[in-house]
Image: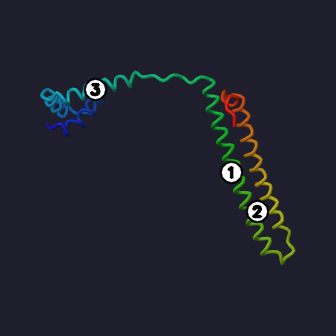
């Protein structure tokens, strides 16, 4: 067996996926190839270290920062969606108003009002989101008082 042929068998042996014939062929190759034996030893050590590796639990402060970031992104996305929806409805309403201005119907005015409310709501959500984030950063940013602008 050549080294190129043995590499897939090395990872298979580490994972315990080889049948007896494949394992025998790999063992024969490893008996005569120092490079592949070293590679298998390194992979075995790495696999063992990874299996015993643990992760520390994030602190409450880290979790709070994470969830604030998620909330801010969701809030901003909602604001942009409302702005886009409001602008689209308002634009379509304006086009329909121009087209339908010959009739006396009042439904285009209602469409314009809905679009305007969605647009204003989106702007308000974005404004409050940015303001709230800036206030939170000002309270916790140690550099905000040291850096002169």
Q: Position of residue 121 (x, y in %)?
A: 77, 50
Question: Would residue 79 appear left or right of 58 to someone viewing this image?
Answer: right
User: Which quarter shows the N terminus?
Assistant: top left
Q: Which residue is mark 1?
A: 80
Counting labels gives 3
Tell whether label 1 touches label 2 (CB within 8 Å): no
Q: Position of residue 114 (x, y in %)?
A: 79, 58
Q: Quadrant of residue 50?
A: top left
Residue 38 numbered mark, or none: none
Question: Would residue 75 appear left or right of 12 to someone viewing this image?
Answer: right
Quick one: SS at disc 3?
helix
Disc 2 from disc 1: Cα separation: 15 Å
Residue at the spot 72% in from the left edge and 46% down from the top edge: 126
Q: Which residue is mark 2?
A: 90
Q: Residue furthest front?
A: 148
- How crowded pointer 2 is (Cα within 10 Å; few <14, some 14-19, many 20+) is rated as many
Whether residue 89 is situated above or below residue 12 in the rendered picture: below
Quick one: SS at disc 1?
helix
Residue at the spot 69% in from the left edge and 47% down from the top edge: 78
Disc 1 from disc 3: Cα separation: 51 Å
Residue at the spot 82% in from the left edge and 67% down from the top edge: 107
- How crowded pointer 3 is (Cα within 10 Å; few <14, some 14-19, many 20+) is rated as few
- How crowded pointer 1 is (Cα within 10 Å; few <14, some 14-19, many 20+) is rated as some
Q: Nearer the viewer, residue 144 or 68?
A: 144
Whichever of labels 2 and 1 marks the residue nearer the N terminus, that label is 1
Whichever of labels 2 and 3 marks the residue nearer the N terminus, that label is 3
Disc 2 from disc 3: Cα separation: 65 Å
Q: Which residue is mark 3?
A: 42
Tell whether label 3 touches label 1 (CB within 8 Å): no
């Amino acid at each position: 067996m050549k080294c190129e042929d043995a590499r897939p068998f090395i990872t298979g042996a580490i994972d315990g996926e080889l049948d007896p014939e494949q394992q025998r062929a790999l063992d024969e190759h490893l008996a005569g190839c120092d490079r592949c034996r070293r590679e298998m030893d390194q992979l075995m050590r790495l696999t063992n270290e990874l299996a015993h590796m643990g992760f520390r639990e994030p602190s409450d402060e880290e979790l709070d920062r994470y969830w604030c970031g998620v909330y801010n992104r969701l809030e901003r996305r909602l604001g942009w969606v409302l702005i886009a929806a409001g602008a689209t409805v308002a634009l379509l309403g304006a086009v329909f108003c121009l087209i339908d201005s010959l009739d006396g119907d009042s439904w285009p005015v209602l469409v314009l009002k809905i679009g305007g409310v969605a647009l204003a709501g989106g702007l308000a959500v974005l404004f409050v989101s940015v303001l709230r984030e800036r206030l939170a950063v000002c309270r916790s940013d140690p550099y905000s008082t040291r850096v002169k602008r």
